[in-house]
Structure formats: structure tokens, C-alpha cells
Amino acid sequence: MKADAFSLPVDSGCAAPPTREVLRERGQREVFCGLTGIVWLHRKMQDAFFLVVGSRTCAHLLQSAAGVMIFAEPRFATAIIEERDLAGMADCHEELDRVVDRLLARRPEIKQLFLVGSCPSEVIKLDLGKAAERLGAKHAGQVRVLNYSGSGIETTFTEGEDACLASLVPAMPASAPDAAPALLMVGSLPDIVEDQFLRLFAQLGIENVGVLPARTADGLPAVGPNTRILLAQPFLGETAQALEARGAQRIDAPFPFGAEGTTAWLKAAAQAFGIDAKHANAVIAPGRERAKRALEHHREKLAGKRISFLPDSQLEVPLARFLATELGMQPVEVGTPYLNRKLVARDLEQLPQATRISEGQDVDRQLDRVRADRPDLTVCGLGLANPLEAEGLSTKWAIELVFSPIHGFEQAGDLAELFARPLRRRDVLQV
Ligand code: SF4
């Protein structure tokens, strides 16, 4: 079932991504900052702790975004930068060391500590890289200390995960030069979805599979020229680049949303590992059929409906592909904070030519376009949803798509339901 050598499709790096006109916007943007990623990352990495070095605003954002967690012993916190720190009257590094020492003494179960930068830590140019190095050496053998930025100056919403995973890459062990081919699935997924994919890879006959992020610190997979990376999330450009710099090659595929997206994603992995196509089809077929049946329920509600995506989660292009090709929706505008043409090439090429693609945001101009287009559904951030609803436009919160399990065959129906629900609600309200 397996060939000795890898076969395509891997991203050779020379294939020109498809060209397509893109409206580039630069102006005021309405998105959460990269700290938001901590909400799902701390659930995924069971022995990790996220220490935000920030202000009370950062603490409030985290506590309200992860509301329920404040009643449990949380695995994130904010080291508050006070006015005297901002005024340069205190040595922030000394204070940070004290906070970390106290934390690690009280919580010996922490095996990975992320120092997370914020707008205030960037404004005072607090070097968290240096702090991570110093604290890592001090607590060597007990805890791995890393750092990344979740600052709203530098990152939007899902870029926090990208920055976090990229910070893990240098800590990954190098795979042996003669190591067997290995698949690395990259992107944080709910455990239940991750397990579904791991079962499918095993059934396909791909034996050596690692996951980034791993659930625990000692599960961090090795990486090297034998590694083929399969991205599960489209917003991981920096992580993919860091892995490629360590010799890994990316498997070029659409993202695993819906029956067809998941099929193509799995088949791309199977092909890269030389798995017999007939065997791959046999493994994939039952899940694909279940997903197609689940989608049928929603087709009637969604087919022909016009949808606009405002730039938010960077999931916009693959989700618009799913809605257009599998449910017959008409994407009017697909806006995304950053368009990484290489990573989303296989989804982008399937979007209708009439769909307007925009990158970045100038919120007033964008809202003018939404008002002129009057789509049946607008996917946008929380702050824009209420004003648009008040103008009679149905909306869907983009953040819900990041917090819900939406990847893979078994979740295809739920994913379609997330878009059908606001339209049903609108119908009920109109009645
Ligand atoms: Fe606000 Fe910046 Fe803190 Fe994010 S990092 S909560 S944008 S101050």
C-alpha cells in the first residue's frame, strides 16, 4: 500500500499561486487581538500555562472571552504592567522573574510556560525573548519557557495561534536523517476531531503521524526533511514557514471543511505517502457519504443565498469555498485580514469568478459595500454584528466558527447548521 518514496502533491515552492484580482484595504480594522487564541490553546495543551504580560484591558479580554474558566484553576493569567512600570520606575524583568518563580512553585504540573506579549509590553519594549531564555535556563528540566506576541498592534485574532505554534518549532527535536516518512498535522483542533483524523490516517496506512500542538510538552513531535506537513488551519503561515525552514515540506491541499474539502485533504495526504488510490477511496467513502447526507438537510435553506465575509478569522476563503461548492451559496465578498495565496490556493481557485476578494480592512468602506450588496448573511466580528442587525441584515459571528468543532466529515452538518441558523431566525422574526 505504500511507496518507498514520497510522491506529489507536496508544495514544491515553485508552482505559481493562481492570480486573481484582490481589493486591498488599509484602514481602521475591527478584530480581536491575538490574545484570544489563548482561550482555545490552553484547552488543547494540557500542561501549558499562558502568562500574558499586559494591562488590565488584556486581563479583562481574556476573562470575558474565557468566562467560565475563572471558576476553575485557570491555565492563563495576566502579569499586569502598572503605571510605575510604564514610567520606567521599576525593573520589569525582575518583577516578571518573581511572578514566574511564584507561579511555578505553586503549580508544579506546568510543563510549558508561554510568556505572551501584548500592546503595553511592546510599547515599553519589554524583551520577552530574553526573559524566556533567562527563565528557561533557570527552570531547565522542569518547564519549557517560550514567548510570542499576541499584541493587537501586531496580530489579529487567529494570528495568536500562528505565533504560538511558530514559537514551538525551534523546540521540536530533529528527526533522524534516515527516519521513516512522517506526517505532521498542524493546527489546534478539538480533541474529538483530532482523534477522528488520526483514526482515518491509521486506516489509510499512514503510520507515523505527529500533531502540532501536541497535547503535552513531552509529546512535541520531531521535524526534519522526512516530515510532510498537512495544515488543518489556514492561518498558520508563520508556522508553516518555520517548519519548512527545518526541512519539512507542505502538502498542498484545500482545507478539510465539508464532504469534498475533507475528501481532497485526506486524498492529498494519501497521495503524498504513496497510498494506493483505491484503498484511499474505500477508507474515505463512508465518511464522505455521511457528510454529504448531513449537508443535504441544509442545502434547501442555503442554496442561492448570498453571503459576505468581513475580514476576521482567516477561515474566510476555505469556508466560502465550502458554502459555494457544497451548498450552492453565492459568496458576494470574501474579506480576509491577510490573504496567503499559497496556503489557500486550492480553495481560492474554486471560488466563483464573480466573488469579490478583499484583503485587510477599512471598516467604513467595507460597511458601505455590505449595505450596497445587502447579502442574505454577513459573517463578521461581534462589534459589527449588532449595528448590521439593526439595519435589517442577518449576521453570523465569525468567532463562533473558531470555537466550534467544524472540521472533517462528522462535523460537516454542524458547520452548515451554523450558517443556516441565522437565516431561520430571520424567517421566524419576519413571520
Ligand atoms: Fe487590548 Fe492590546 Fe491587550 Fe489585546 S493585547 S487586549 S489589543 S491592549
Image: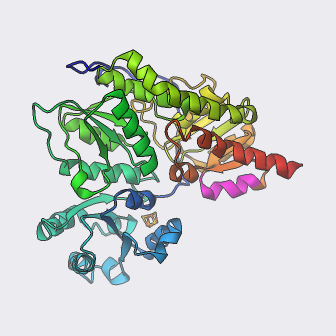
Q: How many marks?
A: 0
Question: Is 212 within the magenta?
Answer: no
Q: 31 or 1, which lies in front?
A: 1
Which of the 4 image quadrants contains residue 80?
bottom left
Return the x and y of residue 186 as percentages of the image width and height.
34, 42
Q: 117 or 49, which lies in front?
A: 49
Instruction: Name the chief secondary structure element in magenta.
Output: helix
Residue drawn at x 21%, y 76% as measured from the top left: 97
Residue placed furthest toward the left: 177
Return the x and y of residue 371 as percentages of the image width and height.
73, 43
Residue drawn at x 49%, y 73% as measured from the top left: 60
Q: For the N terminus, give its image quadrant.
A: top left
**Residue bounds of the magenta highlight:** 381-389
> Is 138 placed above or below 256 here?
below
Q: Is residue 266 visible?
A: yes
Which of the 4 image quadrants contains residue 14?
top left
Q: Is residue 233 visible?
A: no
Residue drawn at x 10%, y 37% as measured from the top left: 176
Residue drawn at x 28%, y 57% as measured from the top left: 216
Return the x and y of residue 262 as percentages of the image width and height.
48, 31
> Is 110 placed above or below 310 here?
below
Return the x and y of residue 398 as percentages of the image width and height.
58, 49
Q: Quadrant of ligand 1?
A: bottom left
Q: 316 or 417, which lies in front?
A: 417
